[in-house]
Amino acid sequence: MSASQLDPDLLRAFIAVAEHRSFTDAAASLYRTQSAVSTQIKRLEDQLGLKLFVRSTNRVALSVAGEGLVSYARRILSLGEEAIQRLRQHEIVGQVRLGVMDDYGTVLMPPILKAFYNSYPGIELHMETGLTASMIGRVGKAYDVVIAMHGRNEKSGELLRRERAVWAGSPELNVSNLDPLPVALYPSGCLFRDWAISALDRTARRWRIAFIATASQLSRPLWRKD
């Protein structure tokens, strides 16, 4: 074997000794005997024609050549692992059924789905957007994964991100002069809608639903509260 064909197993032994600064500890981390690791380091040094470690009775230090090899060895091993992982990803096939709330499905998910497809082209993705309150109970049946919104005290699922609900209005309107106050809400079942109605009901101000919004921006009048 020429110096241009470095054995990954020898490089792993070299990195282990370089990190632990001990043949005994390096051997334990590799689940090998100390003599086996010493033999591997000797083979690598013979192959390169260089001394990689400076040994003394109580310590192991990298030589100048060893210091220079560390970064290259890590890069070689990393590239090898990356190549294996990438090739195996192309062998993964199947289907993933995804349920996502409207806002995330139209704004956040497109670049995420693109990156997922580039990494796993053999996976067929099926995504449905809508009110996720009705989707959560069907995980494992209609969906494999649901990205849903929960209240602050909800403990189920895995937390992906936190958001804060805020009121928004047109700068062209003086809402203090509107009576009753017209509001735009999502359809029934949306937590934002529930929170907004609860907050409005705690005030002494009259209000009415003027717009029911969906991801496709459809609307219809619903009811008034005067």
Image (cartoon, rainbow, N blue to C red):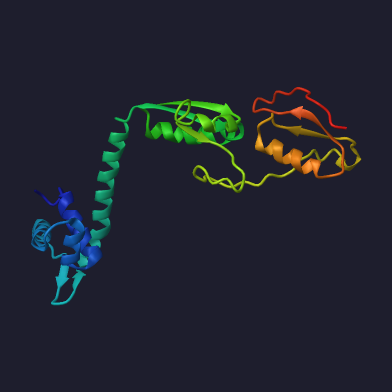
Q: Is residue 79 left or right of residue 40?
A: right
Residue at the farthest bottom position: 57
Q: Is residue 37 left or right of residue 76?
A: left
Which sits in the foreground, 67 or 124? 124
Which sits in the foreground, 160 or 140? 140
Residue 17 sits above or below residue 213 on the image: below
Residue 123: tell me if it is visible. Answer: no
The residue shown at (50%, 27%) is 127
Tally the marks: 0
Q: Position of residue 77 (x, y in %)?
A: 24, 49
The residue shown at (53%, 34%) is 109
Quarter of the image where one finds residue 32: bottom left
Residue 148: tell me if it is visible. Answer: yes
The residue shown at (66%, 34%) is 190
Q: Position of residue 104 (x, y in %)?
A: 58, 35
Q: Is residue 2 left or right of residue 221?
A: left
Q: Is residue 144 left or right of residue 211?
A: left
The C terminus - image quarter: top right
Residue 172 sits above or below residue 77 on the image: above
Which sits in the foreground, 70 or 92? 92
Q: Position of residue 94 (x, y in %)?
A: 36, 26
